[in-house]
Image: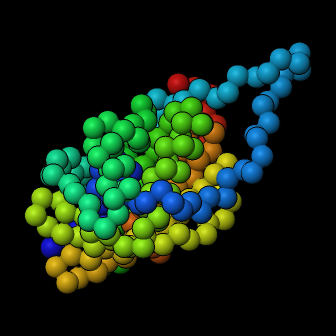
Amino acid sequence: MRLHTTTVLSLSALAVLALTGCSTGRADSTGPTSPVPVPVRPDGESAPASAPLSSAALAKRLLDESDLGEGYTRTPQRPARHDDVSVIGCPALEKLGSEAAVGGSPDFPHKATASFTYAGGSGSEVAEELYSDAGDKLSWGVGRIFEAMTSCPAYQVLAGSAPVTFTAQKVLVGRLGDEQWSQLLTFTAGGRSSIAKQTAVRTGTVVVVVSGSPGLVDAHVHEAVAKATAVRSTER
């Protein structure tokens, strides 16, 4: 059975498929340890927080082939799958997955996604997702996912009748924004194992998630964050 990395690793898929970590641990996040100061205008009044971006505005900030370089081809969006999902070996994560399946986090109102295949890496894939909402909601929703994913050493996910064994490992990531999380995922199906990486970065009201082959994630996460958080005064 061949698993599509970009499908397994999208935040929406994680919420239903692999959001199964016992919530006894905490995912690595290099976010602020003290409250973020509120900007103050010259008149002394607190400046309003940045408003979330629309899905259309987020779509303009996604990486494209010209950003990634030669050898990348954008892949069409795969239709959503609605297989019955169950988790074995991590009861707390199973509960969290059940909540997600009926509308729980992450359910951010604005999002945009893109995925690419890299011909130079034997069909390696990399995917980018952008989400926008109030900063505290993004922080809680994304942190909850990574915390859950890395809390159990190993567990199985049954999607339909096909068992997939997951292990997740927290990895450090340099400071790229207000908060950042990263993990390595190993998933095994049909006797074959694959490794993928997922890094998420929150800057203000935008979260950037880059997932896929570890080398491709490391190669493009910085430019993804830079493009996604560029200031464009005409966007709403």
Looking at the picture, the colour scheme in use is rainbow
Residue at the spot 33% in from the left edge and 50% down from the top edge: 95
**Could you tell me if residue 149 is visible in this image?**
yes
Residue at the spot 48% in from the left edge and 72% down from the top edge: 169
**Residue 36, relative to residue 68: is it above or below?**
above
In this rendered view, identify the residue nearer to me: 9 or 217. Answer: 9
Residue at the spot 49% in from the left edge and 50% down from the top edge: 144
Total numbered labels? 0
Please state the horizontal and vertical placement of residue 46, each as a whole percent of the image. 79, 21
In this rendered view, identify the residue nearer to me: 175 or 121. Answer: 175
In the image, is 176 to the left or to the right of 11?
Answer: right
In the image, is 163 to the left or to the right of 29?
Answer: left
**Residue 22, relative to residue 97: is it above or below?**
below
Farthest residue toward the bottom?
191
Please state the horizontal and vertical placement of residue 7, each as a whole percent of the image. 28, 58
Q: Quadrant of residue 165?
A: bottom left
Please state the horizontal and vertical placement of residue 161, each as a whole percent of the image. 10, 64
In the rendered image, which quarter contains the N terminus?
Answer: bottom left
**Could you tell me if residue 68 is visible in this image?**
no
In the image, is 227 to the left or to the right of 1?
Answer: right
Residue at the spot 15% in from the left edge and 52% down from the top edge: 83
Farthest residue toward the left?
161
Please state the horizontal and vertical placement of residue 136, each as a whole percent of the image. 60, 37
